[in-house]
Amino acid sequence: MPTVAFHTLGCKVNQGETAAMAHLFQEAGYELVGFSAAADIYIINTCAVTVQAEQKSRQLARRARQRNRQAMVVMVGCYPQVAQGRGELPTDIDLLVGSADKPRIVELVERARQASSPLIAVSDWSSETSFEMISASQEVGRTRATLKVQDGCQQFCSYCIIPYARGPERSRPLADVVREATDLVQSGFQEIVVTGIHVGNYGRDLPGQPDLACLFEHLLQVPGLRRLRLSSIEPNEITESLLELMQKYPNFCRHLHIPLQAGQDRVLKAMNRRYDTKDYRRIIDLVRSYMPEIAITTDVIVGFPGETDEEFAATYSFVESIAFSRLHVFRYSRRPGTPAASLPKQVPKEEKTRRSRALISLGERLSREFALGLVGTEQEVLWENQDDDGIWTGHTDTYVTVHSDAPNLRSNLITSALIKENPTTPAATTKADVVAWIKAQGGLPPRSRITFGRVE
């Protein structure tokens, strides 16, 4: 039986697609092994969102080749797609598969195994490109399933390569989405994460144009679904209809990931983001008016071309004032073919690193403050794994990590839990099923002081 190993880089969409591709190989009679094991075929599901992600893709390919020089090495997804557009496809890879060609992965691998030279299967995008569905994997053994409902992006933010890597926006028919969600619940999953590249635009290309709120209203009523989480949504695509569903249905997780990217208006405009800081704050206020206890997470890019110290300081202050529950901080990565790549005043690497560290430190403090706000409350927790010391780790619906040593827990179980600050805090009288705690080591990170962009 031939063996195949996968390694995934990048987003939740990639993670879900890797699971689906692995399922296709299992159905075709292949054995799945770990990427560090000796395998007949190594498949790297690549990412191209940053230069570092592309470098990591190539490093993994070299590592696989060193592990077994007789093995086939395959790159799939975003990196082959954008590399072909630049005329820079690597020549030392046995099979290169584009983003739209993933559903054919088993067929392409079997063709490449018979070929005497590298095989390239990277289809060009067109307005006629349809939603590509890979046969779904049930991801047995996991507690959280991803459900891809949309692909592609046509926003063309000036720094972003994704529209070129993922193609035009296309949605999966609503009935197909509901059918798979029902199958996932019947397979035992407690939580489903709805994913896509630009999920907020779901349905605009479908007959009747069912929007994201329409899709969620159907999904929230799937019998037995305990949790439904939205992976990400752009700020100007949040509707009151969606917020009303969150308020109405307790199985709609109280967590929204709303990308910010910058907290300064000139930088936002240069990024071709379609809002300013006043718009963003208004949207956050609207969200919290419906759900005051919601967790709001975000992405921020530091070191965008031309970003001054004062502009970074404005972003820092804006992020702090919004009080996100978690930050994902990215250093700007120059992507050939994007408008931002040719902008003047590229920020030096050392300065991007300094700004990144400052925002990461702020994010750690904000996350800690949000988590501490749960102390003394009862929360529903999805328990996921147990370490060698018998300590369980799980997540609230607001995606706060908690721990417990309760003896009656198991993976993929949802219980109510009284939240403490740490294991030694006395537990109050509670009707909760278990007592859990948040990580308390180190206390709150100190507040940074910003003076004309200098972080102290």
Image: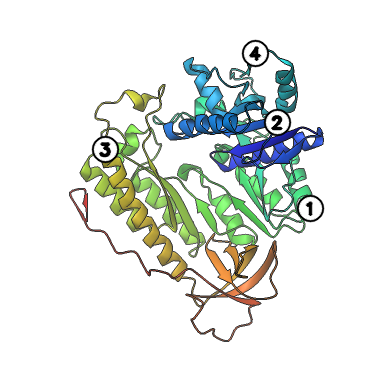
Residue on which the image places disc 2 = 40
The residue beneath circle 4 is 117
Q: Amino acid at mark 1?
A: Ser
Q: Is residue 279 left or right of residue 53?
A: left
Q: Secondary structure at mark 3?
A: loop
Q: Position of residue 394 (x, y in %)?
A: 60, 64
Question: Considering only vertical position in the picture, is 92 above or below 308?
Answer: above
Check whether the beta carbons of the residues at disc 3 and disc 2 lie within 8 A of each other.
no
Residue at (38% x, 46% y) in the render: 279
Relative vertical location of residue 264 with respect to residue 206 in this rendering, above or below: below
Circles 1 and 4 in contact, beta carbons < 8 Å = no
Labels 1, 2: front one: 2
Task: Count how many numbered circles sit on residues in the image.
Answer: 4
Residue that protrudes farthest toward the top in the picture: 116
Q: Amino acid at mark 2?
A: Asp
Looking at the rendering, which quadrant does residue 408 occupy? bottom right
Looking at the picture, which amino acid does disc 3 mark? Glu
230 relative to 53 in the view: left or right: right
Q: Nearer the viewer, residue 312 or 50?
A: 50
Instruction: Report the mark closest to the observer, 4 or 3.
Output: 4
Query: Disc 4 vs disc 3: Cβ atoms closer than 8 Å?
Result: no
Mark positioned earlier in the residue sequence (3 or 2): 2
- Alpha carbon separation for disc pair 1 and 2: 31 Å
Q: Is residue 153 visible?
A: no
Quote the CA–CA distance across marks 3 and 1: 49 Å
Instruction: Name the residue beneath numbered marker 1.
Output: 187
